[in-house]
Amino acid sequence: MGCKVDTLIERYGLTVPDPDYDSVDEFLVTRWTGDDGRSADGYKSLTEWFNKRLLRRIYERHSRDTVSLHLEREYEVITGDETIERDELAADLATDGLDVAEIDEQLISWSTMRHHLKGCLDAEKEPDTATTDWQLNTVTMAKERTAEKARSVLSSLDSTGRLPGAERADVEVQVKLSCPDCSVRVPFENAVERGFVCEAHTQSDTETVPERLRNDLSVVALPFGLTETVQTLFLDQPYLVETIACSVL
């Protein structure tokens, strides 16, 4: 049985507009590894590309406008926090028989893309040692270990009957940063890639993103029993534990 990416590709007949690629999977692997001679794309870029292709196909099936400018903007609204703009878009989508929550549920996360590339397609690439960042790697490894522990807990809950079906659930661990001056909340990876948490309240240009990690952080409680394990995994950096959010999808 394929993963969520495989299911969506088949369900919506997703294709690549570039004739150089025969399939979505070929495009994803080639762009991730950079084997086509261009700079390799990361999980985030590939996730956004995939989600926008998916959104375009959903719109096409409902005869909705797919002009790139409109689609880009509506994608940002759909994937953003719930706001007045999202409510307005939801009402507009409803006139075309679309439900914004159902669309959002079908979009994939960067960790799903990572699993598809490395788990489903067995894709590999040499690490770029020149751009290795131990801070990012520390957070990534901690999230992966936390997800593993969460899956173990879910398996136990399933086997004891306390949470039937839990073992089949997908687990995603996120780190989200909140601006201390407004309601902006962004994923950790996005903040590092952009170089700021909130553009409107960006501090001194000399301050790095890791130094801003002490901003107010979005906290979602971990499953009971994981807290001590996570604290150990974070290599004596307890303040990072507060950034972990674990969601079962």
Image: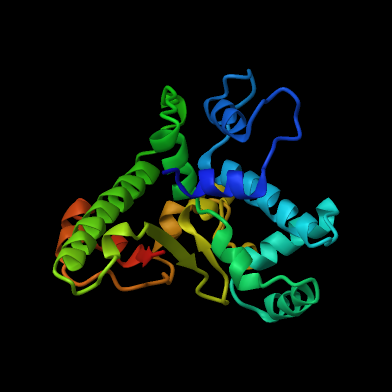
Picture coordinates of residue 146, whole percent (x, y): 26, 55
Count of picture labels: 0
Let me know if residue 128 appears in the view: yes
Residue in front for this viewpoint, 227 or 91:
91
Judge whether 189 appears above or below 217 on screen: above
Does residue 80 lie above or below 20 as drawn?
below
Q: Quadrant of residue 106?
A: bottom right
Q: Residue at x 38, y 66 (%)?
A: 247
| Colour theme | rainbow
Quadrant position of the N terminus in the picture = top left
Q: Is residue 201 visible?
A: no
- At horizontal 69% and vertical 55% (from top left) the residue drawn is 55
In the displayed structure, 150 sits above or below 218; it is above
Q: Quadrant of the C terminus?
A: bottom left
Looking at the rendering, which quadrant does residue 17 occupy? Answer: top right
Q: Position of residue 7 (x, y in %)?
A: 53, 48
Image coordinates of residue 244 in percent, x first then y, are: 34, 63
Along the viewing direction, whichever of 125 and 128 lies nearer the viewer: 125
- The x, y position of residue 62, in whole percent, is 78, 62
- Write the residue at 46% across / 56% down: 188
Q: Would you say 207 lies left or right of 244 here?
A: right
On screen, residue 240 versus residue 4, left or right, reads: left
